Amino acid sequence: MLQAENILFTSTIIIYFLAMILYFVFITTKKEGLSKMAVILEIAGLVLHTGAIVCRGIGAGRLPLTNQYEFATAFAWGISLVSLIFILRFKFPVLGVFAAPIVLLIIGYAAMQSREVRELMPALKSSWLGFHVSTAIIAYGSFGVSFVLGIIFLMRDKMKDSSFFGQHIPSREKLDLIGYRSVALGLLFLTFTIITGAIWAEQAWGSYWSWDPKETWSLVTWIVYAIYLHLRLRRGWEGKAAAVFAIIGFICVIFTYIGVNTLLPGMHSYG
Amino acid sequence: MTEEKQTTRENGLKRAFQFLTSMPFAIALLILLALACAGASMITQGQTLNWYVAQYGERTASLIMTLSLDDAFHSWWFILISAFLCLNLLFCNLIRLPQLISRTKNEKNVNVTAVTAAGVSVEGIEDAEKAFARLRMPKPEEGQDEEGRKTLYASKNRIGLWGAWVCHLGILLLILGFSLGQFTKEDYAVYGVPGQTKPVGETGLQLTIDDFEIGLREDDTVEQYTARITASNGAGREEKAEISVNHPARMFGMTFYQNSTGWAARIGITKDGQYLQDAVLCTGEFVPVKDKEDLIVYFNAFYPDYELVQGQGPMTRSGNLNNPAYLYTVYYRGEVLGMNVLMPDEVLTIDEYEVTFSEPQPYTVIQVKRDAFTPLAFAGGILVMLGLILAFYLIPVRVLARKEEDGTWTFYGLCQKGGPLFRERFENDLKELSHAAS
C-alpha cells in the first residue's frame, strides 16, 4: 500500500506541475481552452492526491495526519480542494494560475520530509486527532486561497480592465467578496480546530490552553483574520487593506505550521 | 460657567465612552494582542533572570524582567489589553442589543421603500410563487404598497443578524471562563512509584499508585502509559481508577490525568558498614543523611543504557535497562562536594558513609485538577462557533414582489452582505422566469 502511495504521490506532483504549466500557458497565450484543460488536470491531480493520502492511511493503519510530511501533503490537498471549489463556483480560472504554484510549493516541501511511517505516541492516540487536524487542513486551504485572492486583488489595481488579465478577473467588489468568503470558511474551520484542540488538550495534557507556541500562533492567526473581518466593515478600509491582512494572515498560517515547528518547539513538536 | 464645565466634562466622558466601544479601538486592541502573543511566544517563558542573562545578555535580560516578558501572558499589560477588549466587547454588545432586536423585527416586516430602493430587481415575472421557490425563499405574505399595488414579501435567515453578537458573547465567556479558571483552579502533580501513597496538595485526598505500566511495541516505542490509582478522602471513602494518556478519570470531583513519567531508584546509605537508611527517589529528588542532615545526596538523572559521549557528556542509547547509571551530586552545608555517575555495582564513599543506587524503575506523574470554570470557557467556544456559522452562512435576505399593471411581477431582492454575488445569483435564478428577459 505504501508503494502505491509513493507512485500516486509522485504522479500527483507531476500532474500538479503540468496543470501549473498549462495555467501559465493560458495566461501568456490567452487561449481560453487551456484554462479548462488546466482545471481538468488539477482535478485529476486532486483525485490522485486523495488516492495517495488514502493509501498512506491504509498502509499506516491510522489517520495519515501526524507528522510534517503527512500534514504538508494534506495542507497542499486542502489548498487544491478549496481553490478548485472557488474556481468552479465563481468561474474564475485565473485563481488557479496563482494557487497552483502554492500547492506545488507545499507538496514539494512535503516531498522533502521523511516519509517513514511511525507509530503514534500515546498523546496522539485520540479520536480528536481526526477532527482537529482535518479541520485545520480545510482552514489552512481556505486561507491559502484567500492569500492568493489578496495578491490578485492588489495586482488588479495595476491592470487595465480591458487587458486579458483584467477581463478574467472579477471586479474589485466581487473579488473582495470572494476573498471574504474564503476567509470566512477558513476562520470557521480554524475556530473548530482551536476548540477541538482545546478539548483534546484538556484530555491529554490536563489543560485546554497552555500558551504552547502552536496554540499561541493559532490564536495570532485567528486574531489577524478577525482584524480582516472588522476592517472590511470600515468604510475606506475594505478592499486593499483587507487584502493586505489576508496576505499577513497566511504568513501567520505558514509560520504556525513550519516556523513554530522548527523555531519554537513545544508540545506540538511532532506535527 | 459651572454648567459649561459640566457639559464639557460630560462631552469628554461621552467621547471617551464612544471611543472605548468603537471599532477602531477594537481593531487597535486586536493588533496589540496579536503582537503581544507573537512577541511572547519568541521568548521562553517562566525562566530565571540568570537564565535570560545567559541566553540574551544582561541588558536584554533586564528588559525582559522589567517588562514582565518572562511571564508575558500573566503580566499587567497583557491583562490590561484583555480587560479593555472585554469592555469593548461587552459595551458593543449592550449597545447593539436594542438595535438588533429592532432590526430583527423590521426584517420580518415588509418595508417596500427599503427593499425597492436598495435592492436588485428583475421585471416581468409571471409566476410569483415559482419565483419565490426558485430563490429558496419561504412562503411570502401578501400586502400592498403606498400606491395600492399588491405585494408579496418574504425574508429568511433573520437569525444571521445575531451572528457577530453571539460570537462576541462567546469570546467574552471564553475569556471570562479562562481568567476565572486561572485564579480559582486547583492543580497538583503527584509523582511516585507503585506502592507509594502521597497527599494531593491541600485537598485532603491521599493518592496511592497501585500499579504503573509502560506498554511497549515490538520496536520499543511506547504505546501507552497506564496507571492504576486509588484516591481516599481520609474519611474512609475510597475510589479506584485506571488512567492513561488521553483517558483521565474523575474521582472526588477532581480529574486525574496520566501526565508524565521518569525514572526512580532506591538509594541505600550505610554508616561504618551498618544499615542506616534507604528510600525510593525520583530523579530531581534528594535525601539528607539521617544522622548528618546537612549532608545531602541529590539524584540528578538516570541513564538506562548509559554511554559517555566525548564533548556531549553522559547520554542514554535507548530506553532499555542495558547499562544503567545514576548521576548524583553530594552537597554538604550547601556546597557541592562532588558530582559523578555511579554504576549499579559501585559504591560512593563519603567519609564513614557508603551510598548505593539500585532497583531502577519508572515513576509516574499524576496531574490532579479541578477547574469549575472550564465548562464556561467551552460554552464560550461553542458560542463563538455558532456565531460564526450564523454570521457567515445564514445571511439575511429579503425579497419583495410587486404586481405591475400588466399583471406581471417585479421582484426586488436585498441582501446587504451579498453584494455582487447576491445580485448575480438573484438575476440568474429569475432570468428563466422573466417574461422581460425572454
Image (cartoon, coloured by chain):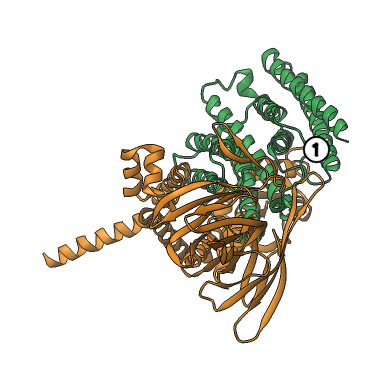
Chain colours: A green, B orange
Looking at this view, name the residue that lies furthest to the left: B1
Number of numbered discs visible in the structure rendering: 1
Q: Is residue B159 above or below residue A135?
A: below
Residue lying furthest front: B272
Does residue B109 show up?
Answer: no
Q: Quadrant of residue B260?
A: bottom right
Residue at numbered disc 1: A53
Q: Residue furthest top?
A: A29
Q: Position of residue A87 (x, y in %)?
A: 71, 33
Residue B161's quadrant in the figure? bottom right
Circle 1: residue type: Ile
Q: Is residue A183 left or right of residue B287?
A: right
Query: What residue do we see at 79% from left, 24% from top?
Result: A15
Image location (x, y in percent) of residue B151: 66, 58
* Towards the viewer: B141 or B15: B15
Front residue of B39/B186: it is: B186
| Chain to which mark 1 belongs | A
x and y percentages locating residue A211 in the rendered image: 52, 52
Quarter of the C terminus of chain B within the rendering: top right
Task: Name which residue lies at 77% across and 45% down.
Answer: A119
Q: Tell me which residue sits at (16%, 63%) in the image.
A: B5
Camera sees residue B342: yes
Identify the secondary structure beneath mark 1.
helix
Quick check: B227 above or below A90?
Answer: below
Q: Percent x, y for residue B3?
A: 15, 67
Left or right side of A169 for B276: left
Q: Residues within 10 Å of mark 1 (few under 14, many from 20)?
A: many
Of residues B280 and B409, the one nearer the viewer is B280
A11 left or right, relative to A235: right
